[in-house]
């Protein structure tokens, strides 16, 4: 941008070191104190300066290593058998981008993990396998490929795979780095190690999954969606239907947010998720916003340009867009649509008044690729 981003201007910290000042800083440090003007420009940047960098994780490359974990560690010993995706700029907090964590969890045929609960909220996007189940606060859910499910903060949860021949791999998304940044983490193992689930499988989907408000059920007062799972087929059908009525967003194509059916708001207070459809050959325009996003290619293949870098993806691949990074997506298939699943920390940005968005206006809305 322009002169307003010049750190030497009046109004910005611009004090040069002198022997007297250096000695003074030493005296302050001795009292666990410091001079603001030595760090002011760094701690109050002109615009967000994420340590996270854009990264693409190729499923094809990770999958064999995720499978290897099946042989190397027992589920009971690992607690959760997960290969984390770690941003090179965020290794200190195990984040994939910003304050969001993600990983690939594998469960072998017949396996069942023990139950726990924690302050962090979790979500799941199933990559492969047919036998995945999870029990969330006593409610058993079965999830298949490309289904989305939530494990809100504080809910007891345990997972497993009831297939007798194939492993399940699903992607976990958690707000662990956010919870830790706020020094608010708690963790408990279930007193009985396993929950006793209610008899009806997928009861939240049966109760709340029909676009109709159920009567005669217990009033829902919790701060997260009563619908705990969002199967792929109706999600994809909803996108295809929406595509018949609108061009969608110039930046995201045809995009829909998974919502709490009672409020229309995000599924959980700290994380939200979307599924978007890019028409055959569609190239979106670039924009940027505060908030970090982790994408998973759910269908098809394409390319995304993130902060001027080109990332080619196909189904199963995961990539991240750090806060305030320009990004645009393109479906490279000329006859089939492509779909991107994503989750983000927008609810945090919005509720704290931090959300900002900007369109890339130069060059017909497309970034130069470096
Ligand atoms: O499934 O409970 O990838 O607690 C990381 C932490 C999964 C889980 C992760 C967790 C879980």
Image (tube, rainbow, N blue to C red):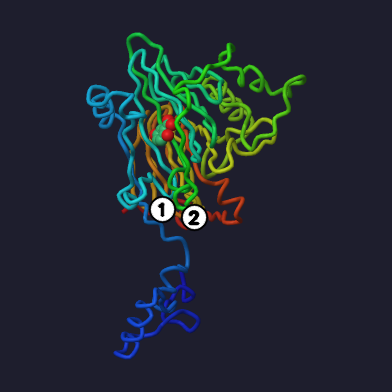
Q: Answer left or right for 264 relative to 293.
A: right
Which circle marks residue 13 in the picture? none
Q: Position of residue 235 (x, y in %)?
A: 55, 25
Element under label 1? loop
Element under label 2? loop
State whether residue 290 appears in this view: yes
Q: How many labels were placed on the picture?
A: 2
Vertical placement of residue 99 versus 302, above or below: below
Q: Position of residue 30 (x, y in %)?
A: 35, 78
Q: Answer left or right for 65 relative to 233.
A: left
Q: Residue at x 58, y 33 (%)?
A: 258
Quadrant in which ligand 1 is drawn = top left
Which residue is outermost to the front? 191
Question: Which of the 4 quarters of the picture holds residue 115?
Answer: top left
Q: Nearer the viewer, residue 61 or 337?
A: 61
Asked if the residue at tag 2 contacts the one at tag 1, i.e. Cβ–Cβ closer than 8 Å, the answer is yes
Q: Residue at x 47, y 69 (%)?
A: 44
Q: Which residue is mark 1?
A: 367
Mark 1 burial class by Cα count in 10 Å: few <14, some 14-19, many 20+: many
Q: Position of residue 326 (x, y in %)?
A: 44, 52
Vertical placement of residue 128 versus 12, above or below: above
Q: Residue at x 38, y 21 (%)?
A: 128
Which circle marks residue 360 in the picture? 2
Query: Does label 1 or label 2 sit earlier along the sequence?
Result: 2
Q: Answer left or right for 222 relative to 361.
A: right
Q: Nearer the viewer, residue 227 or 189?
A: 189
Q: Residue at x 41, y 61 (%)?
A: 49
Q: Position of residue 85 (x, y in %)?
A: 33, 39
Vertical placement of residue 174 versus 357, above or below: above
Q: What whole-number distance in Å separates the C-alpha atoms at marks 1 and 2?
A: 8 Å
State whether label 2 is within 8 Å of ligand 1. no
Q: Nearer the viewer, residue 198 or 103?
A: 198
């Amino acid at each position: 941008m322009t002169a307003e981003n010049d750190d030497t201007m009046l109004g910005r910290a611009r004090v040069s070191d002198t022997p007297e000042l250096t000695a003074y800083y030493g005296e302050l440090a001795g009292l666990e104190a410091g001079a603001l003007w030595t760090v002011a420009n760094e701690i109050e940047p002109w615009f967000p300066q994420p340590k996270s960098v854009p990264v693409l994780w190729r499923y094809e490359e990770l999958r064999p290593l995720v499978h290897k974990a099946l042989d190397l560690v027992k589920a009971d010993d690992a607690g959760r058998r997960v290969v984390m995706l770690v941003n090179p700029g965020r290794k200190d907090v195990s984040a994939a981008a910003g304050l969001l964590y993600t990983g690939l969890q594998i469960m072998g045929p017949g396996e069942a993990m023990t139950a726990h609960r924690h302050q962090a909220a979790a979500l799941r996007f199933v990559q492969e396998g047919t036998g995945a189940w999870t029990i969330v606060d006593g409610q058993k859910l079965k999830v298949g490929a490309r289904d989305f499910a939530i494990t809100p903060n504080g809910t007891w949860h345990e997972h497993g795979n009831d297939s007798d021949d194939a492993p399940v791999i699903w992607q976990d998304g958690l707000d662990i780095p956010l919870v830790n940044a706020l020094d608010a983490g708690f963790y408990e193992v279930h007193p009985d190690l396993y929950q006793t689930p209610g008899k009806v499988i997928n009861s939240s989907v049966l109760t709340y999954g029909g676009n109709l408000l159920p009567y005669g059920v217990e009033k829902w007062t919790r701060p997260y969606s009563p619908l705990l799972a969002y199967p792929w087929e109706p999600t994809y059908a909803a996108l295809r239907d929406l595509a018949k009525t609108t061009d969608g967003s110039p930046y995201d194509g045809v995009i829909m947010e998974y919502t709490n059916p009672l409020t229309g708001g995000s599924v959980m207070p700290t994380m939200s998720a979307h599924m978007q459809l890019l028409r055959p050959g569609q190239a979106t325009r670039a924009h940027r916003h505060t908030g970090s996003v982790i994408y998973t290619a759910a269908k098809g293949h394409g390319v995304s340009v993130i902060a001027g870098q080109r990332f080619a993806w196909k189904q199963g691949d995961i990539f991240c867009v750090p806060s305030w990074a320009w990004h645009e997506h393109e479906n490279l298939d000329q006859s089939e649509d492509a779909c991107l699943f994503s989750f983000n920390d927008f609810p945090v940005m919005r509720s704290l008044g931090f959300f900002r968005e900007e369109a890339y206006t130069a060059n017909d809305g497309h970034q130069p690729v470096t």
